C-alpha cells in the first residue's frame, strides 16, 4: 500500500519543534498532544496509527519490543537521541529519508542526526 503523501503519528514524547519542522517540510503529522488521545497506551498508539495509515514516530524504546513491532502496519521511526536545537534539522531530514523507505517497505527505522538504521518490523 502506498501513501498519497507520507503520514506520521507522532507520539507524545516527540518535541513540538520537531513536529513543527516536519510539518513545514510538507509532512502530514498528527501529534498526539494535539488530539483527544493524550495519555493512551503504546498499544493504542499502534492501533491509532494503523487505523489512519500512519507510521509511528516515537522516542519510546518500548516500541522496539517485538510484541509492539509486530502490530505495526505502516512502519516505525524511532528517534534514538534527544531532540535539541542543534540537531533538530538533521533529525527532520533523516526522518524524511526514512519515510521514503517506509513507503516501499514497512520497517523499523532508527534515526539519529547522523544516520538511519533499517530493521525488519518482525525480527
Image (tube, rainbow, N blue to C red):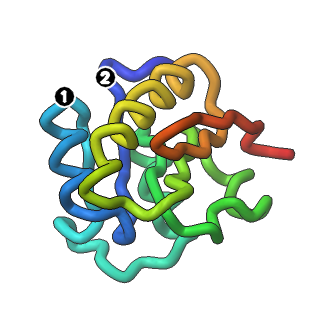
Closest to the observer, 36 or 9: 9
104 lies left or right of 82: right
Is disc 1 surrounded by few (<14), some (14 to 19) or many (20+) residues within 10 Å?
Answer: few
Q: From the viewer's perspective, is residue 120 above or below residue 50?
A: above
**Pointers 1 and 2 in contact (CB under 8 A)?**
yes
Instruction: Kindly report the distance in space between the C-alpha atoms of the residues bearing marks 1 and 2.
Output: 9 Å
Given this view, does label 1 or label 2 mark the residue nearer the observer? 1
Disc 2 marks which residue?
5
Disc 2 secondary structure class: loop
Q: From the viewer's perspective, is residue 41 above or below residue 50?
A: below
Q: Residue at x 43, y 64 (%)?
A: 82
Q: Quadrant of residue 83?
A: bottom left
Give the mark nearest the N terminus, 1 or 2. Answer: 2
Q: Residue at x 35, y 70 (%)?
A: 12
Q: Quadrant of residue 75?
A: top right
Q: Residue at x 46, y 29 (%)?
A: 99
68 lies left or right of 112: right
Q: Position of residue 45 (x, y in %)?
A: 47, 64
Q: Position of residue 18 (x, y in %)?
A: 26, 52
54 lies left or right of 42: left
Is disc 2 surrounded by few (<14), some (14 to 19) or many (20+) residues within 10 Å?
Answer: few
Q: From the viewer's perspective, is residue 36 above or below residue 116?
A: below
Q: Position of residue 36 (x, y in %)?
A: 22, 73
Identify the disc placed on residue 26.
Answer: 1
Disc 1 secondary structure class: loop
Please give the count of numbered marks on the rendered protein: 2
Q: Position of residue 16 (x, y in %)?
A: 20, 61
Amino acid at each position: 500500500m502506498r501513501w498519497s503523501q507520507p503520514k506520521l503519528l507522532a507520539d507524545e514524547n516527540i518535541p513540538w519543534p520537531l513536529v513543527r519542522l516536519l510539518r513545514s517540510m510538507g509532512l502530514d503529522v498528527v501529534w498526539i498532544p494535539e488530539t483527544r488521545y493524550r495519555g493512551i497506551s503504546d498499544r493504542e498508539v499502534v492501533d491509532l496509527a494503523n487505523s489512519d495509515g500512519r507510521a509511528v514516530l516515537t522516542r519510546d524504546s518500548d516500541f522496539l519490543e517485538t510484541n509492539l513491532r509486530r502490530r505495526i502496519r505502516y512502519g516505525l521511526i524511532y528517534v534514538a537521541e534527544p531532540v535539541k536545537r542543534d540537531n533538530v534539522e538533521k533529525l527532520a531530514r533523516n526522518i524524511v529519508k526514512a519515510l521514503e523507505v517506509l513507503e516501499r517497505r514497512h520497517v523499523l527505522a532508527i534515526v539519529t542526526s547522523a544516520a538511519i538504521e533499517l530493521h525488519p518490523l518482525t525480527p
